[in-house]
Image (spheres, rainbow, N blue to C red):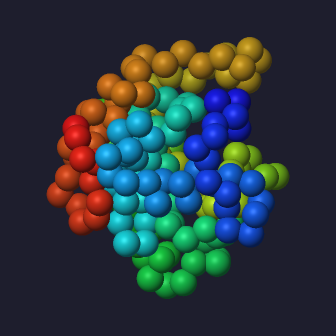
Amino acid sequence: MEYILSAQSRPSPGGQGACIFCDFVVAPPSAYREKLVLLVQERALVVMNRYPFAASHVLVAPRRHVGDLTELDDAEYAAVTTLLRETIARVRKATNAQGLNVGFNLGKAAGAGIAEHVHGHVVPRWVGDVNFMPVIADVRAMPEYLEDSWRRLVPLFADLPGQHPDSV
């Protein structure tokens, strides 16, 4: 609800409402901390999920507003998958996760919350972390504040090319 009511959200190309990923692309590095952006590259970006399934749940997306991986040109696809691979390594290092869920939900029917702008999820996992609270009670227990996760993750992206937050 916080996002839907936000006056800062930017309309998606084509006028289909607001697109947070397009907003991240045009945001200045001084706004990255507030928006939880970790890195913006020429063709792709990585941002923390504001409504995570686990601490340090991040999203990797192309800069261009497209709804499916098949709509990306070869350079965009390579940039997104390369950044996804780099993100996996950094989330592992930051969290000591025992496993990771990595994937794309393509379309509303597949569970995409924002189907209009394709994005992949990297979710750290640990043995015994699964519960049914989110399913039956719409409740999530977070062991870490988003700001704390962001501060822990952002230095791990400093060696990659692209635009980085102004302050850490």
Name of the residue lying farthest toward the right = 109
> Whole-percent x and y of residue 100?
45, 42
Q: Position of residue 117 (x, y in %)?
A: 64, 61
Q: Where is 125 relative to 129, above or below? A: below
- What is the count of numbered marks? 0
Query: Is 115 or 87 nearer to us in this picture?
Result: 115
Residue 6 percent location from the top left of the image = 64, 37
In the rendered image, the residue lying farthest to the front is 7
Residue closer to the observer: 34 or 109: 34
Q: Residue at x 64, y 30 (%)?
A: 2
Q: Is residue 113 left or right of residue 74?
A: right
Q: Is residue 65 above or below residue 21?
A: below
Return the residue nearer the eye: 164 or 111. 164
Quadrant into which the C terminus falls: top left
| Residue in view at x 41 percent, y 21 percent | 145
Q: Is residue 166 left or right of residue 111?
A: left
**Point 36% across, 27% down: residue:** 147
Rendered-image quadrant of the N terminus? top right
Residue 94: x percent and y percent? 27, 37
In percent of the image, x 49 and y 29: which residue is there? Answer: 54
